[in-house]
Image (spheres, grey):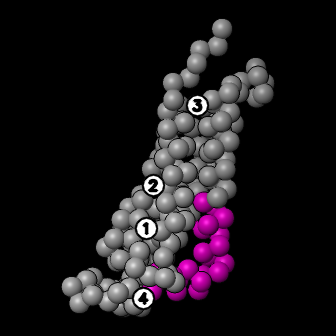
Amino acid sequence: MGFLARIGGLRFAVLVLTGMTALQMALIAFGNITDFGTNQAFVQHVLAMDTTFRSPDMMWRAITSPGLQNTAYVVIIAWEVLTALVLLAALAGWIRAKDATARRLATLGWVMWVLLFGVGFLAVGGEWFQMWQSDKWNGLQPALQNFLIAVAALVVAHLPAKERT
């Protein structure tokens, strides 16, 4: 059976979502690697909490060490690269009709995505480091968009497939 004959509606949708998110995460990682300084400044300001309301009750949370800030940024980039690779492997699985493996890998990739944007940016950056208080260094909207993309993909990937007759 050829590739086109093997793809069904839901399976095709998950394949496309996997490909789209693999490409998006690869481009995010590529951008952070090739334009290192732009988002490095973002991470530094968020961790330093230097554009928040600077409440004395919160500022003890700030990380001002450039070494720790840069380490955090490199870990973020490494996580993005790993997530992109997992999603690319999932895409290859969908294309080769290795559906069980592809679904596991896609699920892993999207959970990694959720951890990055949901835990890393929304919870830790947004709440712990009070990113929501910053007019300039507030990435909550893009983080929420990315979080929702991964959640939607997870839901679609785990919908029960309709049996063909």
Pointer 2 residue: 114
How far apart are the two marked residues, 3 and 4, measured between alpha carbons?
A: 47 Å
Q: Is residue 52 above or below residue 7?
A: below
Spatial CA distance of label 1 from label 4 is: 16 Å
Q: Residues within 10 Å of mark 3 (few under 14, many from 20)?
A: some
SS category of the residue bearing label 4: loop
Tell which of 73 and 89 is nearer to you.
73
Q: Main secondary structure of the magenta part?
A: helix
Pointer 3 and pointer 2: residues touching (CB < 8 Å)?
no
Q: Are marks 1 and 2 in contact (CB under 8 Å)?
A: no
The residue sitting at 45% across, 86% down in the picture is 45
In the rendered structure, the answer to whether residue 56 lies left or right of residue 133 reads left
Identify the amino acid type marked 4: Thr
Left or right side of 41 for 165: right
Front residue (pair 78, 73): 73
Q: Which residue lies under the disc numbered 1?
A: 121
Q: Closer to the observer: label 3 or label 4?
A: 4
Residue density around tag 1, few if under 14, some if 14–19, many if 20 or more, within 10 Å: many
Q: Residues within 10 Å of mark 2 (few under 14, many from 20)?
A: many
Disc sitting over residue 99 in the figure: 3
Residue 147 can be seen, yes or no = yes
Mark 3: which amino acid?
Asp
Q: Between disc 1 and disc 2, whose residue precedes?
A: 2
Q: Amino acid at mark 1?
A: Phe
Specify which label sits upstream in the sequence, 3 or 2.
3
Estimate the x, y position of residue 143 in percent, counting from the top left: 50, 64
The CA distance from mark 1 to mark 3 is 31 Å
Which residue matches tag 4? 51
Q: For the residue carrying disc 4, how many other residues have a C-alpha within 10 Å: few (<14), some (14-19), or many (20+)? A: some
Q: Which mark is residue 9?
A: none
**Residue that lies at the very extreme toward the left in this rendered image:** 57
